Amino acid sequence: QFRLSSEQLARKASEVSILKELADICYVTLDPWEILYVTLERALLLTRADIGSILILDKEEPRSFIVKATIGLGDHIKMDDKINFETSIAKYAVINKSPLVIENIEKERRFGRTNRLHYGTKSFVIMPIKTIKDVIGVLSISRKDNKAVFTEAEVEALTPLLSNAAFTYENLRLMKDIEQEEKHLAAIKRIFSTLNSSLRDSELLHTILNEVQGVIPFEIAVIMIRNDKSEDHLKVIDLQASTTIDLAIGDKLPHRGTIVDHVMQQNAVKVIDDLDAIRQNEKDEKLFINNDLKACLLAPLTSRGQVNGVLALYAKDSSKFHEIPETVEGITNIISFAVEESRLSAAVSKRNQELVTIKQIGSALASSTFDMKQVLKYTMDMIRTLMNVEAGSLSLVKDNELEFAVAFELDMTQLQKIKLKLGQGISGAVATRGEAIIENDPPASSHFDPVIDEITGFRTRSVLCVPMISQGKVIGVIEVLNKQEGDFSAGDKDILQSIATSVSIAMENARLYEETVSMAEQERGIRGMFQKFVPKEIIDKIIHGSAANKEFVDELKTITLLNIDIRGFSELARKIGPQKSVALLNYFFSVMGGIVFKHGGIVDKYLGDGFLALFGAPVSTAMDAENAVSAALEMQESIPAINEDYAQELLGAPVNIGVSIYTGEVVVGNIGFDMKMDYTVIGDSVNNVFKLQNFTKPLPDSIVIAESTCRAAQAPLEIRELDHTLNGMKIYELLGRKKIPESMTA
């Protein structure tokens, strides 16, 4: 009894010592794998066993165990070997989360296994290694002594050991993960800083790959994106390699049906552990470039929800690739952004260059002296630079044929001998249809006519032809040949069509310019001849009516007539003589005529010491009567200034006027005969305005208006009815305008 108690005490002391030793080593090492090995050693000591291993669950699918510590198994099981989870007995300890004690494996009907010699005894223990959250692996122990059988007591002795080990291992692993994540975050931060730098294109991508290599060790990195010119190929836009490879930036690789195509379709990262198997596929052989490298990581590059390419990293083994799936996703997002930024930057740069060139062409066309041959030659030179093509020409439609007007890199002496009928060849088809044509394989096109190639010796590989359209008619075509890089695209067509439109407008402007110059010379002649004798409005109507092919016909219309007369001018003329009389009249007419023009009227005719003005001819408005009233009131207000500044000094006496206004129907038109024709008015209304003038004589500087004018005026007038009528119509003296009370305007 005493001896048994003494043995139990010694055993407990040993267990405590082992646990203490394990606890102490936690402060010595930060390597979680070393903790597992020490745990295995101590477990073997506690159970007096000599064979054992620790297996950690792999998170990747399909599930498996990874060997992280082994003792006594020799070469049968080595570090980092993978053991299939589904076929391993150890899975039961994981599934049940409890120890599995086997007294004799060959008698266990659950498993149906025979013992394997390298495991020693037929009895063994499998203990789950549990953390707070889950089972992370198992401890497996056995003995070389075939007769020894494990007991529940030994399992109980292992429980605190494994609990302590699991806790320590998990903490160290988390610390290592955090350290690794911090390293990755620092690298990603540096990559983001690189994005904000002045680096662009390949230089930017190369710098990013350098940073990536610090996070994901690789031997070769290749960035491939979809080729705009061919959807079946990926284009290498950057690569980094520590060894010589048969691949270069700019290479185009077929990807349809390859593992890369699968990755892009699935939009998911894929790690390839053994490239040799993949290389058996002929389509994949070109993509997996170095036979010394066994592993590859393929990550899709996505922009705006669409997979546009792939990042391929090659290494000697895949272990590091499996550890960082989330980091890979973040890095590929950054690379995708950098690629898209470079693409957009290149597109913007190209578009800016196109706009600059189009602007230069537009400026040349706008500022030209209408030497169209020189302008067209300059335009074609700009097109050659902008479109990056081998040759080009501009042809004009003449008598249902296309004639070459200007070309580059083609023999014009040969081209001028050629006249294409509308519908002949690609350019003839464009001229007929009025629509652009792109042919990247001309010989296969039904429109292609090899006659020009045969005559000039030129070899046409691709064609872009656009129409020049003016006023709905095709006046010519612009054709460019053999794009230097790739095929002609819809974007190329839009640019060339814009240029063609500008050229069409310039040619139409040149034609209109010639017509305008001719018309301007004709108009200047007419105005120069008649301006002094005919109101400006009449000349405008004659000229513009003629330009619009409209006849200048007589018409019956309602207008307002104004007659102004100087009182007692005959006596004044005798007193001051003819010279001063003419000077007075010219000054008077300039002031009063200016007032008429100011208010939209015209001076119809001069009548000795007065004139007749028309408001509403040749163009009528609702304000004709109102304008006439305003003109009359301003004339009345101008008399004191005329007397003060001019009449008193010249005559020694003041000048008085009379103004009459009448609104009524008149006949307006060209009155006279071939030798003498006047634009004027006739009718009773003309006679009536002169009759009204008689009523002004007793009233110096007065304005007399007819009732019809009062009704037609827009604003209320201050008037005084006179004791006379005209053809049954009341007549008034115009005193001014009525003032509207402030309360009514508020």
Image (spheres, rainbow, N blue to C red):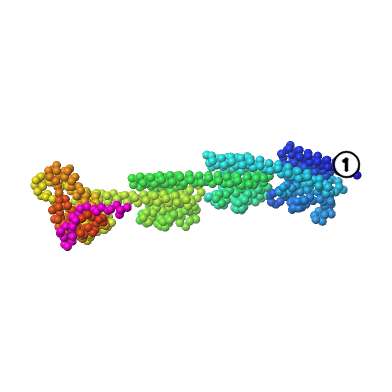
Q: Residue at x 21, y 58 (%)?
A: 709
In the rendered image, is residue 546 in sight? no
Residue 464 placement (x, y as % from top left)? 45, 52
Q: Position of residue 33 (x, y in %)?
A: 73, 42
Q: Position of residue 251 (x, y in %)?
A: 57, 46
Instruction: Residue at 13% x, 50% y: name it.
Output: 567
The spot of residue 213 in percent (x, y) is 62, 41
Above or below: residue 428 compared with residue 331: below
Q: Which residue is most to the left?
A: 574
Q: Which residues are magenta?
A: 720-746
Relative side of 727 to 35, left or right: left
Does the segment drawn in magenta span residue 735?
A: yes
- Dot 1: element: helix
Q: Which residue is mark 1?
A: 6
Quadrant where the image shows the N terminus: top right
Q: Is residue 315 left or right of residue 590?
A: right
Three-letter code for the amino acid on which mark 1 is drawn: Ser
